[in-house]
Amino acid sequence: MEHLLLAIFLTLAIAAVLSIVLKRFGISHIIGYIMTGTIISYLFGFNGLRIDTLDLVGEFGIVFLMFTIGLELSFNKIRKMKEILLANGLLQVVLSVAVIFLMAYSVFGLDFNTSIIVSLAFSLSSTAIVLTYLKQSKDILTPYGQKSMGILIFQDLAVIPILLLITFLSNNDLSIGEVLVKTVLSAVVVVAVMFTVGEKTVNALLKFSAKTELEELFLGSVFAIVIGASLLAHEMGFTYSLGAFIAGMIIADTDYNVKVESDIASYKDLLLGIFFFSVGTKIDVLYFVQNIHIILFVFVLVMLFKAVVIYAIIRRSSDKNTSAKTALALAQVGEFSFAVFALAGSQGLITKETASFLILVSVISMILTPFVINNIYKLSSYFEKEFYEADVITPIGLREHVVVAGFSMLGKIVAKDLKERGVAFVIISDNLKHVLHARKLGYMAYFGHLNKLPVLESLKVDQAKAVILTVNSEHNKRLISEAVHSFSDHANIIMKIDSAEERKQMRDLHDVEFVDASFEVSNLLVDRAMRHSA
């Protein structure tokens, strides 16, 4: 017992110290969790051992991550994402598997089964790292963020047939037809149960627990829903995360989705920390040092080929910059590769040494991924020039200026009026075409997202006379308002609203001046009518 308590104490202490140190250098805290796992595993001598309980707890970090993603994806959003989810996702997995298989089989001379396993595992990207970054940075709202999320969701779904295929390869008694039939039937049962009995149960449980006004009961109900859905999916032969994802989609159509996401945020982050810690325990430092040359060579080769495949797929319908950012974000090998290698190793399809080698390649790619995605705008700038956000925007030399968010029709009118009045202003928009048009008109305009701290700093929002929001999306209005007030307490935010319903939705935003479009137009129409009659 004392041995266990000492391990827990050292884990928390080392993780805290490393995270603080790494943060000072702008390095993701994820690296701190992974390094902590490696250090603790050597201190207590369980490096390389399978720690099933730790792995299971860590896996629920991904479960809750997928649950929060499901909360943001209603059926309407899924329908809108069908091109990204199905076409791009399917092409990415199929082409990545084909390219990596040919490389493993022809160049490295691996046998057929090992080549298939390697290609299947390496075709998957890291949901835990990439989606965590996209959500924290708000890049999930950008074109590359949407495309990355769609492909990642498809990859998570693809884990199911991949694991079934490995089971088939290890058992000559099973026919591929039997495997496919079982998978289809199980999928139908899971979806049918979740969206009939499950949907009614979820609604009733959340409604009942919310009425009690007991936070612990409501939180307990949420945990019961997530874990219950995960267990159901797992019992039917699917991944835990798939069940959680579907549960999130069900709750997305209820009135409790925002509260649920905020309530479980800290628990999700804690469980994700445990997951990355468990990744660190799988690192064999001695083996890595002895084989560093070949490990790094394979790592670079896999990420390069995978990035080229993803870039080519996205480039079919997007600009070079969006394609480059998506390719850079998804080039790594993901956490589900561990499940693939573990199953293949237990079934005797690959040797223990091969499994250790492949796990190290996966871990190295996951360690370097935060460095890549934290600098993704700088890296993508080598592919196509645009007006970049974040630290690429040089701080402007203005004071007492007006920041105009958005440059659609209303934004153009506001900018024209400000120019005629001789007021200094700057335009920020997440639509590159609008930014290019504004610059063509001679305005100071930048491409970016005003809810990001580096953008707020670069545009000197804390020294601005006012921030005028002309964007149409209620979600973006809320994100920007909260970010601006968090950055500057005395910020003067002026927001256009289109209806009484929207005013009601935004009533919790403090120190925001609302301009009701309908009311102002009504006053203007009456004034014109009275002037004409006089």
Image: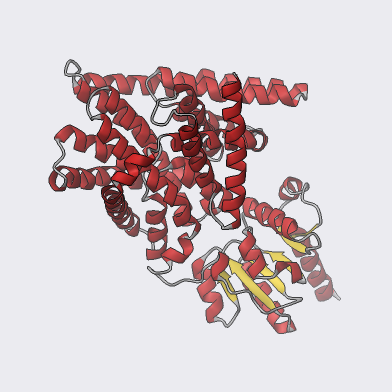
Q: Can residue 290 be seen in the rendering of this structure?
A: yes
Q: Can residue 361 be seen in the rendering of this structure?
A: no
The answer to whether residue 150 is left or right of residue 414 is left
- The percent coordinates of residue 275 (x first, y second) are 49, 34
- The percent coordinates of residue 328 (x first, y second) are 39, 56
The part of the image, by quadrant, that contains residue 451 is bottom right
**Image quadrant occupied by the N terminus:** top right
Q: Residue furthest right?
A: 534
**Image quadrant occupied by the C terminus:** bottom right
The answer to whether residue 334 is left or right of residue 309 is right
The answer to whether residue 59 is left or right of residue 116 is right
In percent of the image, x 25 and y 35: which residue is there? 354
The part of the image, by quadrant, that contains residue 283 is top left
Question: Looking at the picture, does residue 492 appear above or below residue 91?
Answer: below
Question: Looking at the picture, does residue 30 appear above or below residue 263?
Answer: below
Question: Looking at the picture, does residue 402 appear above or below residue 501?
Answer: below
In percent of the image, x 25 and y 38: which residue is there? 118
The answer to whether residue 419 is left or right of residue 519 is left
Q: Nearer the viewer, residue 49 or 393?
A: 49
Q: Nearer the viewer, residue 81 or 209?
A: 209
